[in-house]
Image (cartoon, rainbow, N blue to C red):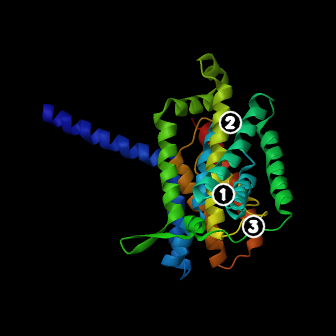
Amino acid sequence: MAETTSISAKSYARRTTWRDIMRAQEFGVFLILLAMVVSLSLGTSTFMTSTNIFNILRAFSWIAISAFGQCMVIITCGIDLSVGSVMAFSGLITALLLTRQPSVPVPLAVLGGLAAGSFVGLLNGLMITKGRLPPFIATLGTLLMARGTVQGITGGWPVRDLPESFRNLGQYDIPVAGVGVPLPLIFMLICAVLVSIFLTRTVWGYRIYALGGNETAAGLSGINTAHTKIMVYTLCSFLTSVGGILMTARLGVAAPTAAQGYELDVIAAAVVGGTSLSGGEGSILGVLIGAAIMQVLRNGLVLIGVEAYWLQAVQGLIIVLAIMFDQWRKSRR
């Protein structure tokens, strides 16, 4: 009798686990990605080639890294519109340090770029908490300030002749089992693990979710909401700077127009990945899958011959549908 009860309990546990997986937001997003991959594999002859797959993995790496930070911001019921400009700004500062005379070693130049980008996030956090500006207005302002600074410093001209040791950060492939794995992909996976641990296994992660769930209750429970917001926006810009530096290394040039419009890609990756704009919900795994969906979509539209002009329209439609689905899911609870 006891043995039968034990078996029944185990069976129930398995059913419960499978039911939880089926209901998980990440599972639904993964099914969408899988359907896109299968459709494009059957519809085109070039999608599943190794060259195309690794190009996709390389190109969505810096978008995903920035989206990890955007995820944390959106969990707190905020938004960061400055991520595209921060990518360009951090990449430019790094490039200027590398090309000045005398030149700065690559590690120090990268640290300079990370510090410059993180400063923009700190400014965002201070304007939102101390200046009491809405996140939309504060980050829209820094979007324009950072982009204008990039344009002003360069006079509209790109910074070229970056050293090979720096370009390798974005262009080098690490041989793994006879296959070259893009280095940006490795950086992205490391960032995904670290940020996921930070959100789910630390007290700061608990505070971020609590802040997005109910800011008033979070404050009454002893959480310093202002400090948490400042930290989140600074971390978002720091991660975005990592992505911007990798993007600059991949291109081999720091262009003042780099990452223009990327804020749409980053926000789309977070929202499509299940991060709720109402706050309090989101996961790094979901964001990772969301970023992959957006890059597969971009790549697939090109392969099937859709003009690039239509890409933003499709991205906008996907964002709207993702938000509508999120609202519908909340209404059913």
Q: Under tag 3, what secondary structure?
A: loop
**Does any portion of residue 179 appear in the rendered image?**
yes
Q: What residue does disc 2 label?
A: 77
- Which residue type does callout 1 highlight? Gly
- Which residue type does callout 3 highlight? Val
Q: What residue does disc 3 label?
A: 159
Residue situated in front as seen by the camera: 326 or 83: 83
Q: Is residue 74 left or right of residue 10?
A: right
Q: Is residue 128 left or right of residue 67?
A: right
Q: Residue at x 59, y 42 (%)?
A: 329
x, y (%) of residue 149?
Answer: 83, 53
From mark 2 to mark 3, how far is it between C-alphas?
A: 37 Å
In the rendered image of this protein, does residue 90 appear above or below residue 297? Answer: above
Of labels 2 and 3, earlier in sequence is: 2
Q: Nearer the viewer, mark 2 or mark 3?
A: 3
- Which residue type does callout 2 highlight? Cys
**Does any portion of residue 322 appear in the rendered image?**
no
Q: Residue at x 67, y 21 (%)?
A: 216
Question: In the image as oriented, which residue stretches furthest toward the bottom?
Answer: 45
Q: Residue at x 68, y 33 (%)?
A: 230
Q: What residue does disc 1 label?
A: 244
From mark 2 to mark 1, how far is it between C-alphas?
A: 24 Å
Count neighbours of disc 2 (C-alpha within 10 A) and say few if under 14, some if 14 to 19, many if 20 or more.
Answer: many
x, y (%) of residue 265?
Answer: 68, 57
Count neighbours of disc 3 (C-alpha within 10 A) and say few if under 14, some if 14 to 19, many if 20 or more.
Answer: some
x, y (%) of residue 137?
Answer: 82, 40
Count neighbours of disc 1 (C-alpha within 10 A) and say few if under 14, some if 14 to 19, many if 20 or more.
Answer: many
